[in-house]
Image (cartoon, rainbow, N blue to C red):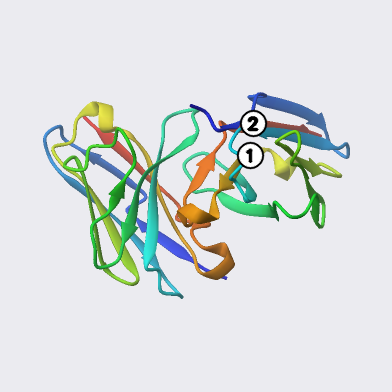
Amino acid sequence: GAVVSQHPSRVICKSGTSVKIECRSLDFQATTMFWYRQFPKKSLMLMATSNEGSKATYEQGVEKDKFLINHASLTLSTLTVTSAHPEDSSFYICSAGTGINYGYTFGSGTRLTVV
Amino acid sequence: DQQVKQNSPSLSVQEGRISILNCDYTNSMFDYFLWYKKYPAEGPTFLISISSIKDKNEDGRFTVFLNKSAKHLSLHIVPSQPGDSAVYFCAANNNNQGGKLIFGQGTELSVKP
């Protein structure tokens, strides 16, 4: 089955710095990946759709200059949280997939803490 | 606008009994529904799905029922096991919008020995 790897699993950064999170499809090619964010005891909220070779599509209310997405290859999408603030602390998860399970396999998530 | 709703934040069930998790949706354009199991600090793990052209899908101890007229789906787990304790999310997809999923708020299931 499809495997999605996400790295790092946990990161702590200082306020004002930038953090990059990687999402890789290990055994398949993903022209599209998805980035979600989960607040404590809340649902997963779609942030953006990452498209290989083109600009990401952001959901309403998500700042594209704050959350930079790059999908440079068919197996890698990155999410960079720029100039991070404590309110950006959250659990970020990516997803990808192929065929009938398009977009349905999730990475293990990244816990970001901004201090 | 919460298009997918799980109105029960938690559910406690005795081991061996049936667990029933409910989910309601408002968007009639959704044509594919999924259930995920999630542990803290981990990504969701796919459990079972159902297409809108079906009303039931079964996989081992897990069965998903879909009532399109009521815009309601449910996940049945029988028999429930302590290892089933986790947060369960239902999610919906509109095939016209690619693979992005709209999630419910989740229900925390606790199965007691």
Give the structural element (helix, strand or loop) at label 1: strand
Q: How crowded is the residue under tag 1: few (<14 C-alpha within 10 Å), some, or many (20+)?
A: many
Q: How crowded is the residue under tag 2: few (<14 C-alpha within 10 Å), some, or many (20+)?
A: many
Q: Quadrant of residue A51?
A: bottom left
Looking at the picture, which amino acid does disc 2 mark? Answer: Glu
Question: Dot 2 falls on which chain?
Answer: B
Q: Is residue A66 visible?
A: yes
- Give the spatial CA distance, label 2 vs label 1: 6 Å
Residue B53 in the figure: left or right of residue A91: right
The residue identified by callout 2 is B108
Q: Quadrant of residue A115?
A: top left
The quadrant of the picture occupied by the C terminus of chain B is: top right
Q: Position of residue A31 (x, y in %)?
A: 37, 68
Q: Residue at x 49, y 48 (%)?
A: B43
Looking at the picture, which amino acid does disc 1 mark? Answer: Tyr
Q: Position of residue B31 (x, y in %)?
A: 63, 51
Q: Residue at x 67, y 24 (%)?
A: B8
The residue identified by callout 1 is B88
